[in-house]
């Protein structure tokens, strides 16, 4: 968890530095900023199911270490290109796309390894603690990113990002390897494409999993549309600057931390179904202030508060969703369907 937190600190740094570099230093247009954000999220839609299959086949610890090392190398491209005088939007596009792909595989391995390290009865609490650590790291990284960008510039801030990936790799290498899951008795391992198809078929015929996938897909579309121009809007129309952007993202991180901490209590009191519904409903409502906001510190504070509420709801729903989807995959393991490869990871 320490390694994941270290990696998230660096990721939060480049979430501030990347749009700042594109908009304020490379004079990116709205279309270029949207493309940059879209390329960062595109691998999530293309690689979620294949990532689940990869995680089922290979050592999760090795995947965590390997993706961290690749991430360190990729983010180092930005300051090196800046020093060489060749930094451009196409370079940032490539960095965003590769980092997005690496993040999908890394997060799949990070989520899938948790049930192998803790007892089933402690899984929700473990997910909540992981979410809390992530929220704290996200907040610290965002504020640190804003400071570093202001002091040394957006391009040089990526050196800190690279260092955080290396720290994360070192921590991941120390995780006890739980071992690779074995195929169910009497069931030969399927080919990679077959496992993906099995996951899709299982999702389609299982109401709980199907509904979760549809809800997460629709939520993801809304978040993607907003996120594509969020930083650009704050940096240009609202004239927030990198410091304002860092403040809004930092308070949002505090919300994620709070949501992860209270998630077990909320689920214990209201149950997973109502908790998921409330979380999904709160996210779009909290995005309304962005539609009517204007320049100035008052609106910046409103947006920061709305972002905190939105990510708190997302954290509560996210930890609950992981518990529900993991529990469903465990039930399927003991049914006639056999273990379903990749579905749990893809949902998360």
Image (cartoon, helix red, strand yellow):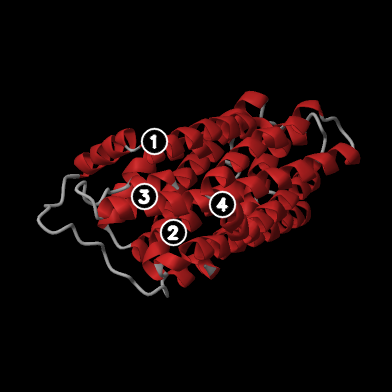
Looking at the image, can residue 164 be seen?
Answer: no
Q: Could you tell me which residue is drawn at 50 percent across and 61 percent down? A: 124
Q: Position of residue 332 (x, y in %)?
A: 28, 50
Query: Do residues under tags 4 and 3 come within 8 Å of each other at their CB atoms?
Result: no
Q: Which residue is mark 2?
A: 110
Q: Looking at the image, tell me whether mark 1 or mark 2 is earlier in sequence order.
A: 2
Query: Do residues under tags 3 and 1 come within 8 Å of each other at their CB atoms?
Result: no
Q: Could you tell me which residue is drawn at 57 percent across and 65 percent down? A: 129
Q: Which residue is mark 3?
A: 328
Query: Do residues under tags 4 and 2 come within 8 Å of each other at their CB atoms?
Result: no
Check the image and report above or below for 214 versus 66: above
Q: Secondary structure at mark 1?
A: helix
Of the residues tagged 4 and 2, which is closer to the observer?
2
Q: Looking at the image, tell me whether mark 4 or mark 1 is earlier in sequence order.
A: 4
Query: Do residues under tags 2 and 3 come within 8 Å of each other at their CB atoms?
Result: no
Q: Position of residue 119 (x, y in %)?
A: 41, 70
Q: Secondary structure at mark 4?
A: helix
- Inter-mark Cα distance, 4 to 2: 29 Å
Q: Which residue is mark 1?
A: 210
Residue 175 appears left or right of 339? right
Q: Looking at the image, tell me whether mark 3 or mark 1 is earlier in sequence order.
A: 1
Check the image and report above or below for 119 versus 44: below
Q: Secondary structure at mark 2?
A: helix
Q: Which residue is mark 4?
A: 80
Of the residues tagged 4 and 1, which is closer to the observer?
1
Check the image and report above or below for 309 versus 121: above
Query: Do residues under tags 1 and 2 come within 8 Å of each other at their CB atoms?
Result: no
């Amino acid at each position: 968890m320490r390694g994941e937190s270290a990696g998230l600190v660096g990721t939060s740094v480049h979430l501030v530095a990347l749009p700042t570099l594109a908009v304020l230093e490379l004079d990116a247009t709205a279309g270029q900023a949207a493309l940059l954000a879209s390329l960062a999220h595109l691998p999530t839609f293309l690689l979620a199911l294949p990532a689940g299959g990869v995680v089922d086949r290979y050592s999760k610890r090795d995947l965590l270490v390997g993706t961290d090392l690749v991430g360190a190398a990729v983010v180092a491209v930005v300051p090196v290109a800046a020093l060489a005088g060749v930094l451009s939007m196409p370079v940032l596009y490539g960095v965003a796309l590769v980092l997005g792909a690496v993040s999908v595989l890394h997060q799949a391995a990070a989520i899938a390894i948790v049930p192998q390290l803790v007892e089933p009865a402690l899984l929700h609490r473990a997910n909540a603690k992981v979410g809390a650590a992530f929220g704290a790291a996200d907040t610290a990284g965002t504020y640190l990113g804003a400071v570093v960008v202001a002091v040394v510039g957006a391009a040089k801030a990526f050196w800190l990002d690279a260092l955080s990936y290396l720290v994360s790799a070192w921590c991941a290498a120390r995780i006890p390897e739980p071992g690779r899951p074995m195929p169910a008795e009497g069931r030969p391992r399927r080919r990679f494409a077959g496992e993906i198809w099995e996951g899709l078929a299982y999702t389609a015929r299982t109401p709980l999993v199907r509904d979760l996938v549809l809800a997460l897909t629709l939520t993801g579309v809304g978040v993607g549309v907003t996120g594509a121009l969020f930083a650009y809007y704050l940096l240009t129309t609202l004239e927030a600057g990198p410091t304002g952007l860092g403040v809004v993202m930092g308070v949002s991180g505090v919300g994620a931390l709070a949501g992860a901490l209270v998630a077990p209590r909320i689920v214990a009191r209201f149950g997973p179904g109502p908790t998921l519904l409330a979380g999904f409903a709160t996210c779009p409502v909290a995005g309304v202030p962005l539609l009517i906001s204007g320049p100035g510190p008052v609106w910046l504070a409103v947006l920061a508060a709305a972002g905190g509420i939105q990510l708190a709801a997302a954290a509560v729903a996210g930890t609950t969703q992981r518990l529900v989807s993991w529990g469903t995959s465990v039930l399927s393991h003991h049914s006639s369907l056999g273990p379903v490869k990749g579905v749990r990871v893809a949902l998360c």
